[in-house]
Image (tube, rainbow, N blue to C red):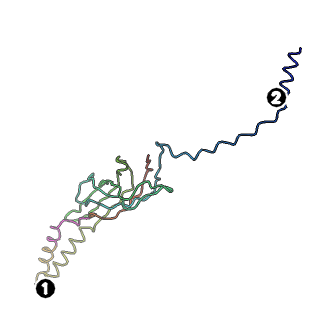
Amino acid sequence: MRRSTLILGLWTSILALPAAPAQPAAPAAPAAAAPAGAVLVVPIGTKITVRTVDQVTSNDPAGKKFEVTVDAPVAVGDKTAIPAGTKGYGSLASSKQAGHLAGKSEFRIALTQLVLNGKIMEIRTDPVGESGKNSAGKVVGAAALGTAVGSVTGNAGRGAVIGGALGAAKKGQTVGFPPKTLLDFTLSSPLMLQ
């Protein structure tokens, strides 16, 4: 019994001791940097301004690839997602050259790739394009000019035929973008960057 009284007294003494002062909390860890595999999302509707390196025209075949450089940085929040000077590529989505007698030249291009951190990233943008004047107006205008010249010389009918033939002999207006043209493309799907 003495032994149990001794153990009980020891426990009572331990319990009666004042509590040890609380240890200061460990300093909070700094906010963790984004993990190496973190994704930065450039949302749909983001504008990417580029400058053409290569010329692209309505004479080029659909599918032709051309080079561009990003002209202005693209930011997401406080991070630069796409730096100015980034190399990229576009593609001629559709191309139609005006005929001799009628039609108008048209073409549409889209930005399709960016080279980021040495990797080619596929992107989707809304196409941009150009269209020229209708060829039919050119033929009618040339015929009218031929009629005017013919009437001065005394044969308006022959002048109209000659003017119309000359107008029809010329192919329709070619439209395009020369090198160094600034173009704005809009993302049509989000771009995921690592």
For disc 2, the marked residue is 14
Give how far across and how far down residue 155 sits, in percent. 11, 81
Please check the rendered image and state whether residue 167 is part of the magenta-colored stretch, yes or no: yes
Amino acid type of the residue tagged 2 in the rendering: Ile
Residue 72 vertical position relative to residue 11 in the rendered view, above or below = below
Q: Is residue 27 shown to the viewer in this render?
A: yes
User: In this view of the protein, which residue sits in the foreground, 97 or 36?
Assistant: 36
For disc 1, the marked residue is 152
User: In this view of the protein, which residue sits in the foreground, 40 or 185?
Assistant: 40
Point out the image quarter for the N terminus. top right
Amino acid type of the residue tagged 1 in the rendering: Val
Q: Is residue 104 shown to the viewer in this render?
A: no
Range of residues picked out in magenta: 164-175
Mark on residue 117? Answer: none
Tell me which numbered mark, 2 or 1, is placed earlier along the sequence: 2
Secondary element under disc 2, as helix, strand or loop, is helix
Give how far across and how far down residue 93 sits, in percent. 31, 54
Q: Quadrant of residue 22?
A: top right
Choose mark 2 or mark 1, whichever is in front. Answer: 2
Residue at left offset 25%, top offset 71%: 137
